[in-house]
Image (cartoon, helix red, strand yellow):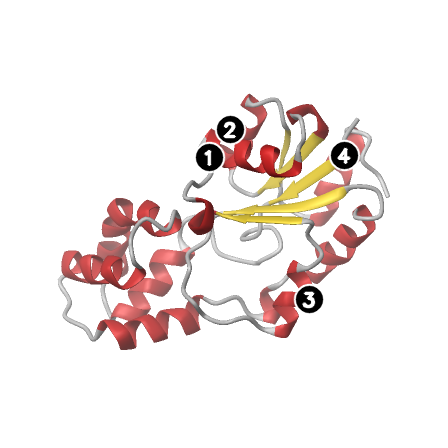
């Protein structure tokens, strides 16, 4: 019997481009660098940023050097924080409404790969995040999906068995990793598809 539903954030609640693309693109804009060069450098430094293992400005400096640009990192950091931060208009509010219905019967959690840009919080974002019983972010816990440790950390935090959980993510490798641990994992494409997929597993509102 399912007790917990765990959601990813970007690509599920937050409308973004294809997984892994939005971050290099907005960083390239902030640095004034070629996107393909930034994307290549991101392969070396992105994981350290997403797991909080390196200071963000240090990583930006290294990526800028790899991309062949000289830039004021403080100003670039402010530009990136502005461009990268989620906007209210990017949120899938229909999914939020559905999630609130699920919350009447299940514990609802978030497991998301994020970067700490210290952008500050907005009231609408606080209103959204408080719907989740537990929020685990990669830059805070030091591991990211699809690492099994990211999922095990969540299971430990909510005191749950894999068989008691449903995990929803838009990125197939994350879905596959959760399934391997015995968590029922579903790939998110649309709200309509999600409702049907959940119903197949007996999750209805």
Residue at 54% over, 22% down: 180
Q: Which residue is mark 4?
A: 3
Chain-order first, disc 2 or disc 1: 1
Q: Which residue is mark 1?
A: 146
Q: Tag 4, which secondary structure?
A: loop
Chain-order first, disc 1 or disc 4: 4
- Closer to the camera, 188 or 6? 6
Q: Which residue is mark 2?
A: 177
User: Label 1 crowding class (10 Å Cα cut-off): few <14, some 14-19, many 20+?
Assistant: some
| Residue 19 seen from this side | no
Q: Tag 1, which secondary structure?
A: loop
Mark 1 and mark 3: Cα distance apart in space: 28 Å
Q: Which residue is mark 3?
A: 127
Residue at 69% over, 32% down: 165
Whether residue 113 sits left or right of residue 57 in the image: it is: right
Mark 2 and mark 3: Cα distance apart in space: 30 Å
| On screen, residue 9 above or below 73 | above
x and y, in percent, of residue 136 in the image? 55, 47
Mark 2 and mark 1: Cα distance apart in space: 6 Å
| Residue 205 seen from this side | yes
Q: Are marks 2 and 1 in contact (CB under 8 Å)?
A: yes
x and y, in percent, of residue 23 in the image? 39, 57
User: Label 2 crowding class (10 Å Cα cut-off): few <14, some 14-19, many 20+?
Assistant: some
Q: Tag 3, which secondary structure?
A: helix
Mark 4 and mark 3: Cα distance apart in space: 23 Å
Q: Tag 2, which secondary structure?
A: helix
């Amino acid at each position: 019997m399912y007790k917990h539903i765990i959601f990813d954030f970007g690509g599920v609640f937050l409308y973004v481009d294809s997984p892994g693309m939005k971050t290099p693109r907005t960083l390239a804009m902030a640095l004034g660098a070629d996107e393909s060069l930034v994307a290549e450098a991101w392969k070396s430094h992105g994981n350290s940023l997403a797991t909080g293992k390196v200071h963000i400005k240090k990583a930006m400096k290294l990526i800028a050097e790899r991309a062949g640009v000289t830039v004021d990192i403080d100003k670039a950091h402010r530009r990136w924080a502005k461009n990268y931060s989620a906007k209210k208009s990017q949120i899938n509010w229909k999914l939020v409404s559905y999630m609130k219905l699920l919350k009447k019967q299940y514990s609802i959690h978030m497991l998301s790969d994020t970067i700490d840009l210290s952008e500050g919080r907005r009231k609408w974002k606080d209103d959204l995040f408080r719907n989740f019983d537990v929020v685990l972010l990669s830059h805070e816990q030091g591991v990211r999906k699809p690492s099994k440790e990211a999922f095990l950390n969540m299971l430990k935090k909510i005191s749950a068995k894999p068989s008691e959980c449903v995990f929803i993510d838009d990125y197939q490798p994350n879905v596959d990793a959760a399934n391997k641990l015995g968590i029922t994992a579903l790939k998110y494409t649309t709200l309509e598809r999600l409702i049907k997929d959940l119903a197949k597993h007996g999750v209805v509102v």
